[in-house]
Image (spheres, rainbow, N blue to C red):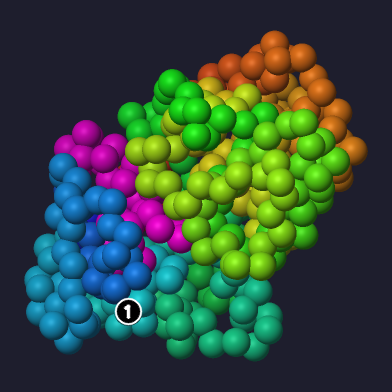
């Protein structure tokens, strides 16, 4: 199968969750003999933080403007088996017009940010990556988010056939590793700064750090503001490329997952960090949201907390109990949440054109 994708980025993991997911999916697709052509607009902020330039089995096409790449894009789509546009694609509207106007390939829109898309629509905002007429023209609409989000994509954007394609992890990239002293912590958090995560981060990470001065807390990520409320026992590691994630996770027995407000409110939207930490053999503590138990069993494969006191209780557990949860999460992830598994799900949906 030949799949053409018009996406946000696969070349830079800086400040976004799309790149790591696509790397795993494309690697898995290539292993199964499929070919991917990925069109990415070459923007300065990703070019400055580029941590991938080529991927076996994937033809990565950088372009400066849609006009410059249109002829090549038209040729690639014309003989593709499937052509896909994703959320936050800088040229999403133009790419959708091309895909929907080409006979032959299965036309797909993949919203990796469904709760954000729907939230912006509710606020009356224009969503720049959506066609003005909605998603009714596509043969298949995939959503990173399941649950009621699928109904809303039908009702509000006219999607005719919708299916979830959840996050995943590539075990070749995320796997157990040796700890690194600079990352050593009792409790860690890896994620790009987002204002709508800050209240939960304060409650589940920064306040426990303030009240447990004898413990070491480490945050890794990008885009943290200068006025971020750091504590004396909270260390910061600037943006880490995926290759360094295993060492980061391995350097603490427990890591935090905080879901962005729109995604937590919608439910059924697991962060890729959950699967990554589990694949690396580190236990995760997550905020609570509907559908979490679809991916991990709370108490057996993942810890959950709603407030600071619950975090204290989990941090005080014996190390063997935390390690037991980590092992169970890794087993579940390798069985159900790998990029290979998701790629197979996607190929099956593309082969039939639509889910049942």
Q: How many residues crowd mark 1 within 10 Å: few (<14), some (14–19), many (20+)?
A: many
- Residue 257 position within the rendered picture, expressed as x and y whole percent measured from the top left: 65, 44
- Residue 84 position within the rendered picture, expressed as x and y whole percent measured from the top left: 32, 64
**Residue at point 71% right, 15% down?**
319
Furthest-top residue in this view: 320
> Taking 327 as reference, is 92 above or below it?
below
Quarter of the rendering containing residue 57: top left
Residue 233 visible in the shown view? yes
- Residue 186 position within the rendered picture, expressed as x and y whole percent measured from the top left: 67, 29
* Residue that carries the numbered disc 1 in the rendered image: 91
- Residue 341 position within the rendered picture, expressed as x and y whole percent measured from the top left: 41, 34
Helix, strand or loop for disc 1: loop
Q: How many marks?
A: 1
**Residue at point 77% right, 59% down?**
199
Residue 10 lies in the magenta-colored region: yes
Quarter of the rendering containing residue 285: top right
Relative to residue 132, is residue 232 drawn left or right?
right
Work out whether residue 108 or residue 301 is closer to the camera in this orientation and state it. Answer: 301
What is the magenta range? 5-34
Relative to residue 50, is residue 239 drawn left or right?
right
Relative to residue 156, is residue 98 drawn left or right?
left
> Taking 202 as reference, is 318 above or below it?
above
**Residue at point 38% right, 46% down?**
241
Residue 333 visible in the shown view? no
Work out whether residue 166 or residue 352 is closer to the camera in this orientation and state it. Answer: 166
Work out whether residue 188 or residue 41 is closer to the camera in this orientation and state it. Answer: 188
Furthest-right residue in this view: 309
Work out whether residue 50 or residue 229 is closer to the camera in this orientation and state it. Answer: 229
Residue 317 lies in the magenta-colored region: no
**Residue at point 70% right, 20% down?**
322
């Amino acid at each position: 199968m030949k799949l053409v994708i018009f996406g946000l980025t696969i070349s830079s993991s800086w400040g976004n969750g799309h790149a790591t997911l696509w790397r795993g999916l494309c690697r898995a697709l290539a292993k199964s003999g499929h070919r991917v052509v990925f069109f990415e607009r070459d923007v300065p902020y990703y070019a400055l933080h580029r941590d991938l330039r080529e991927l076996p089995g994937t033809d990565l096409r950088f372009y400066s403007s849609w006009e410059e790449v249109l002829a090549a894009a038209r040729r690639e789509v014309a003989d593709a088996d499937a052509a896909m546009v994703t959320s936050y694609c800088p040229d999403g509207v133009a790419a959708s017009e091309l895909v929907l106007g080409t006979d032959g390939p299965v036309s797909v829109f993949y919203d990796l940010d469904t709760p954000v898309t729907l939230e912006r629509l509710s606020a009356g905002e224009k969503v720049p990556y959506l066609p003005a007429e909605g998603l009714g023209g596509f043969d298949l609409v995939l959503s990173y988010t399941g649950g009621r989000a699928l109904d809303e994509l039908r009702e509000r954007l006219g999607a005719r056939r919708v299916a979830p394609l959840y996050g995943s992890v590539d075990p070749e990239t995320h796997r157990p590793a040796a700890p690194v002293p600079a990352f050593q912590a009792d409790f860690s958090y890896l994620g790009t700064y987002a204002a709508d995560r800050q209240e939960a981060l304060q409650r589940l990470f920064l306040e426990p750090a303030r009240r447990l001065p004898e413990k070491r807390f480490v945050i890794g990520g990008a885009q943290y503001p200068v006025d971020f409320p750091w504590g004396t026992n909270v260390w910061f590691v600037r943006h880490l490329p995926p290759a360094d994630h295993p060492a980061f996770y391995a350097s603490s027995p427990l890591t935090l997952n905080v879901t962005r407000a729109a995604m937590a409110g919608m439910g059924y939207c697991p962060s890729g960090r959950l699967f990554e930490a589990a694949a690396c053999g580190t236990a995760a503590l997550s905020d609570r949201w509907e559908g979490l138990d679809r991916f991990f069993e709370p108490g057996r494969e993942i810890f959950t907390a709603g407030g600071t006191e619950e975090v204290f209780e989990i941090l005080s557990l014996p190390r063997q109990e935390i390690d037991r949860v980590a092992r169970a999460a890794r087993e579940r992830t390798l069985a159900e949440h790998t990029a290979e598994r998701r790629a197979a799900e996607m190929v099956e949906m593309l082969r039939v054109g639509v889910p049942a």
